[in-house]
Image (cartoon, helix red, strand yellow):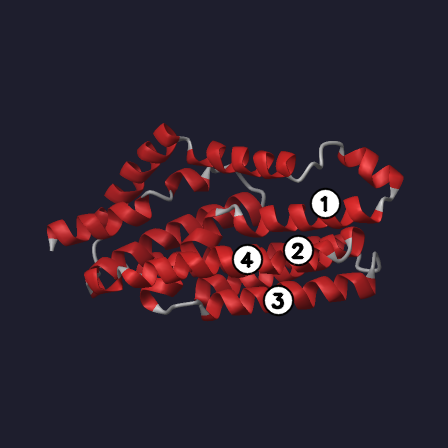
């Protein structure tokens, strides 16, 4: 839960800073900072992979996980979930909301946009599972820094609703970590090591796609590899 609490704190701080600074922070500054975070995330993911005990297990997990993810269309499912939430909250015409400058709609839009950005993604799932299973919150801390800058950017235009999205993060990621902690007793150090190495590859995919914008990779469709990797490690060890 430590990683989730840090994530909540950075979103709140970033949101308040965004409201205070408004649009003073130049876009090129934000782009450069995000690129730096992307490079760090890429290097960190590589470092996690290099700790693999058996690279073939990680390879098998990634291939199997990607096939399952494409079959189940996890990435599309996450996108559909986002659109469903948007419809449920009744924000259908974004431009009309912005043109009318209606404060209530603006609050909802900020809350919705930030919640989807912070929750629906491989990094939230991967980091929460790692935090719950191993107590390693480093992935969520990296996500926290990224979310903090994103909250600053969104809050500068969408206001207080962005800050309240921290409540969604607390419930969502906290629940994932607590659920993962319940199965901790079944995981051996070898199983955790291979799962962490597989997670490193997924982190690299997130960095390449979302932070560095180098190539579109459906990282969400690789998430089943996190389950397959410890199973293969158990079988072969």
Query: Which is more N-terminal, label 3 or label 2?
Result: 3
Which residue is at a point 66% across and 58% down the rendered structure image? 164
Say left or right for 13 vs 24: left
The numbered dot on residue 169 is 4
Mark 2 vs 3: CB contact within 8 A: no
| Residue count near mark 2 (Cα–Cα under 10 Å), binned few <14, some 14–19, many ≥20 | many
Query: Which is more N-terminal, label 1 or label 4?
Result: 1
The quarter of the picture where residue 16 lies is bottom right
The quarter of the picture where residue 85 lies is top right
The quarter of the picture where residue 92 lies is top right
98 above or below 204? above
- Can residue 159 be seen? yes
Pick the front one: 237 or 8: 8
Pick the front one: 215 or 182: 182
**Which callout, 4 or 2, points to the residue nearer the camera?**
4
The numbered dot on residue 150 is 2
The numbered dot on residue 3 is none
Pick the front one: 45 or 16: 16
Q: Position of residue 44 (x, y in %)?
A: 44, 61
The numbered dot on residue 109 is 1
* SS of the residue under disc 3: helix
Q: Position of residue 26 (x, y in %)?
A: 80, 56
| Residue count near mark 3 (Cα–Cα under 10 Å), binned few <14, some 14–19, many ≥20 | many
What residue did someone put label 3 on? Answer: 10
Say left or right for 1 vs 214: left
């Amino acid at each position: 839960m430590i990683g989730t609490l840090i994530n909540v704190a950075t979103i709140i701080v970033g949101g308040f800073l965004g409201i205070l600074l408004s649009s003073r922070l130049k876009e090129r500054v934000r782009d450069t900072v995000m690129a730096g975070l992307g490079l760090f995330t890429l290097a960190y993911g590589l470092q996690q992979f290099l700790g693999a005990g058996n690279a073939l297990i990680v390879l098998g997990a990634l291939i199997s996980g990607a096939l399952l993810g494409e079959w189940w269309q996890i990435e599309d499912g996450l996108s559909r979930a986002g659109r469903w939430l948007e419809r449920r909250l009744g924000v259908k015409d974004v431009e009309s909301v912005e043109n009318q400058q209606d404060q209530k709609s603006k609050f909802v839009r900020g809350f919705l946009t930030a919640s989807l950005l912070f929750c629906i993604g491989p990094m939230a799932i991967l980091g929460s599972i790692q935090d719950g299973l191993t107590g390693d919150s480093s992935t969520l801390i990296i996500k926290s820094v990224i979310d903090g800058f994103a909250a600053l950017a969104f809050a500068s235009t969408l206001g207080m609703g962005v800050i309240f999205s921290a409540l969604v993060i607390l419930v969502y990621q906290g629940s994932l970590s607590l659920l993962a902690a319940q199965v901790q007793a079944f995981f051996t150090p070898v199983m955790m090591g291979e799962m962490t190495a597989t997670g490193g590859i997924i982190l690299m995919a997130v960095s390449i796609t979302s932070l560095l914008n180098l190539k579109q990779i459906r990282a969400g469709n690789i998430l089943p590899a996190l389950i397959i990797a410890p199973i293969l490690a158990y079988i072969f060890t």
